[in-house]
Amino acid sequence: MSTCNDIRYLIDVQDKNITFLPGCVTLGVYKKQPCKFISGELTYDPTHCEKCGVKNENYTVIKNGKQESRITLPMTGTSLTFLKLKKQRFYCRECHSSFTARTSIVETNCHISNQSKAMIIIKSAEAYSVKSLSKDCSVSWHTAQRVIDKTARSINHHHHQKLPKNLSFDEFKYAKGMMAFEYIDAETGDILDILEKRTSCFIKSHFITNYSLEDRRNVQTVTIDMNAGYAKVIADIFPQAEIIIDRFHLVQLINRSMNQTRVKVMNRFKTSNNENMKKYRRLKRYWKLILKNEMKLSTTEYRYYSLFGQRLEKAIVEEMLDYDPELRANYELYQRLLQAISKKQFKALELVLKERSSSLISSQMRTSLKTLRKHLPYIKNSFRYPYNNGRIEGINNKIKVLCKVAYGYRNFYNYKQRIMIHFKFRAKETNSIISNQKKSRFQAA
Ligand SMILES: [Zn+2]
């Protein structure tokens, strides 16, 4: 009896009606591949006839031979594993029909074990291509895809639910030149749906057909990033919603234009003059210090910098700013914007944006100022509400990994299913990744 239990534990068979005898594992070949066969027997005393429902009393239902079927199991070790299960056949004397014993390890008329199916789902939640996961689970590509389809359908029925109060919008590239649109619950981080296209028209019709006006009126905020032109659509779909621009994108915007300004100034020093070359190299090497929040520059810790010697961070930045008045002017503006955004001081930000900028301000910085001015009302909301696109960005990164590892998806529907399964089954783990990302994102600000 102990062999029986050992095998049961080994291949995760809980059904007590299946018995294994010593020596039940044999090596063999299937489709030219070496494999293991485990022989088992399934039998029990049925309580009633499955065909007519008559109670099994006084041998109404009798055992009538056995039927062997080959059931695919997950691999054991490195080889394919099959369960050769001898299923009991029963004969009913009342209705004169036969039926086969049932077991929880496999569905009727199916030869792929539920363990294998579970394995497919577990693997499909990870970044594997369908081809490689079907190989690992010893099933065909079509079988794997079918199991994934079935699971995805069962988890993807949120349209019957209400919209959450706080939404977050984003987009991602999924094939050459193709952009998809996704929206999530900004509070819980649950993916609500993914759309194939991100055009205003497509988004609008999606929300209008799937949700009632009453439901849409309930939406209070929608967080978006600055590049996307969703503002108008949002006003159309969600009449009560406030638009929030993700704060991280504000920082990113001014960060980028400050860096471009630095490169521009730096390249001016790229001459044959030795003194200028020294400045060029310093500006090139210590770009991070210029972008760093001024308040976070160390004024107490002396460290060794190969192009400066033993110095303070603050002193290095000051010296580099002295090289060029344009660099200094832009740096000062950049720092004022950065302080206002990171401390959520809307008045201060408004003040900087209203000022007439000096002629020393670079064209890149001017463009950023213009963008900020344009989105000012939405930026104000981002200071008032605690929501940001951190979660959705984290989700996006994961989605990209899924796409890359699976060598791209030609079929958007299949891709979407993988994404939904991934976030449904790995929600916990993903949340911790996202919170880590959030931490690192805001360290910059
Ligand atoms: Zn019967």
Image: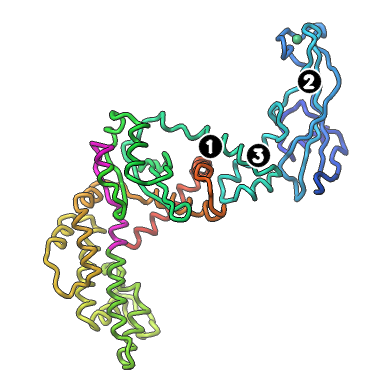
Residue position for label 1: 152
Graded by Cα atoms within 10 Å as few (under 14), some (14 to 19) or many (20 or more), the crowding at tag 3 reads some
Q: Is residue 294 above or below residue 177?
A: below
Q: How far separated are the C-alphas under marks 1 and 3?
A: 14 Å
Q: Which residues are magenta?
A: 234-253
Hey, which quadrant is residue 98 in on the image?
Answer: top right
Residue position for label 3: 143
* Whether residue 6 can be seen here: no
Query: Residue visible at 53% across and 37% down?
Result: 152
Picture quarter with the C terminus: bottom left
Disc 3 is placed on an element classified as helix
Residue position for label 2: 44
Q: How far separated are the C-alphas under marks 3 and 2?
A: 30 Å
Disc 2 is placed on an element classified as loop
Position in image of residue 150 (x %, y %): 57, 34
Q: Is mark 1 within 8 Å of ligand 1?
A: no
Q: Please state which amino acid type lies under the numbered disc 1.
A: Ala
